[in-house]
Amino acid sequence: MKPLLLAVSLATTLAQAAGPVQLDIRADRPGPVIARQVYGQFAEHLGAGIYGGLWVGPDAEIPNVRGWRSDVVGALKALKVPVLRWPGGCFADEYHWRDGIGPRAQRPPRVNTSWGGVIEPNAVGTHEFMDLAEQLGAEVYINANLGSGTVQEMAQWLEYLTADGDTALARERRANGRDQPWKVPYWGIGNESWGCGGHMKPGYYADLYKQWASFAKAPRGNRPKLVASGGQELELHWTETLSAEVKDRMAAITHHQYSLPTRDWQKKGAAVGFPEAEWIATLAVPQTIDGYLAKHREILDRNDPGKKVAIYFDEWGSWYDPEPGTDPGFLVQRNTLRDAVLAALHFHVFHRHAERVKMANIAQMVNVLQAMIVTDKARMLLTPTYHAFAMHLPFMDATSLPVQLSGVPDYTLGRYSIPALSASAAKSAGGKLILSLTNTNPQVGLPLQIAVGGKAVRTVTGQLLTAAAMDAENRFDAPDRVKPRPFKAEAKNGLLTLTVPAKSVLVLELQP
Ligand code: AHR
């Protein structure tokens, strides 16, 4: 134990000897608004992502509102979920909406061939999902089935949701209990059409997209933004093809990128008990995304100079080996401090590209992959990722501000080298100066001096998320092990130097 402590304190001394990192926020150069939708969520019919985790049915003993569990919905409401994507993912391209309307007892059970081959009871369908979104106060982003559905099926689903006249589909919706049309702001046409959504090539998909988009009709004032499936893992070709060929009715192109510690889908790496090499490897992914987004933006700026087409990063997050003893098709994994730091690094990237990135949806909201919430029958647990989202609430609809950093050391291990400090600043919708920081180095705290337009700040207050171990997690018997704590620092003799603790996320409000 002792030699390790000595090594750590020596490293800390060395880092401090290099002098504090200097951070200057250019409040005089406001950038684009950070769309609150980049704090969006995704809930798929996958494992306990819906059934059990969110939906228990109206007759369950677990307290619920019309079938949706009250504890989980209550915790999610505190995150002000801006938008919720449903029903998939890969499941979207095997989902037939008519299976999920009408009396629940009469709905057809199907096999969920995407996830675990379990029976999909269709107890959660259109009406139930829209009720969940209303309970959360979230916009809906519905992903239509291009892979195994038909244009007619898609067109009728959209009409069922939005028709305001006296059409047969509107009557059917009313007979099923919903009088007024729902608002449907976002409508996805296929999911991962390069893969589970049909293994298509971009040119073929672009043609199909144009056809499907032509029939995705809704009344004026309630027309969704239409969203095209983008390419595999950030590759550029789909963005090039779609932005060149689809000129109308494409509000956004999606991207998915998961963070696998090993980059190997056969053996991704453990969620807990991982070596430091897998800590840095995981945290290096957002830097790659940052670089790729710059390249996608170059393509879009060329093909869409009017900036009509956004990027929706509608699946992101960590993906580890499944929790031992669980069905691998249910994508159950544990969530640690590493996931919270990873989330904050993604937020910084999305803020940096706020001009084009107008939505992002972490995968997934409850019990699946990098979840906010884990449930076990009647019990519920908030993960470190939940807390990272909660800490960043002030960034929703904030105006991004450029940050100049000097003296940031690299954090290097093996073949990975990333900046030890990542920062993102903004002016919140309420007019406050806010700053998010992550220290990616798990060993060394970083001394930091903050200025706004060259003028040192006097006081910072906020919340700090860190823990003793890289894989610290919340458990049902210790639910608050990783939880934000209040943080405050004040200038002494006119100078404020604070330390961003090792392996931490820090969100601050600044008083210049
Ligand atoms: O989020 C899990 C799966 O990952 C989604 O269903 C799919 O779109 C992606 O490959």
Image: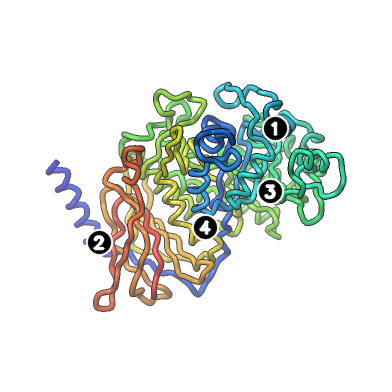
Q: Are marks 4 and 3 in contact (CB under 8 Å)?
A: no
Mark 2 vs mark 4: give the one in front: 4
Callout 1: CB less than 8 Å from ligand 1: no
Q: Which mark is residue 271?
A: none
Q: Quadrant of residue 161?
A: top right
| Disc number placed over residue 186 in the picture, else none | 3
| Residue receiving disc 4 | 351
Measure how far apart labels 4 and 1 are at the Cα level: 37 Å
Q: Which of the two marks, 4 or 3, is nearer to us in this view? A: 3
- The secondary element bearing badge 1 is classed as helix
- Could you tell whether 325 is left or right of 497 in the image? right
Give the Cα distance between marks 3 and 2. Answer: 49 Å
Q: How many residues crowd mark 4 within 10 Å: few (<14), some (14–19), many (20+)? A: many
Q: Residue at x 25, y 61 (%)?
A: 18
Q: Secondary structure at mark 4?
A: helix
- Camera-nearest label, 3 or 1: 1
Amino acid type of the residue that numbered disc 4 sits on in the rendered structure: His
The residue under label 2 is 18
Residue 308 against residue 166 in the figure, above or below: below
Q: Residue furthest left?
A: 2
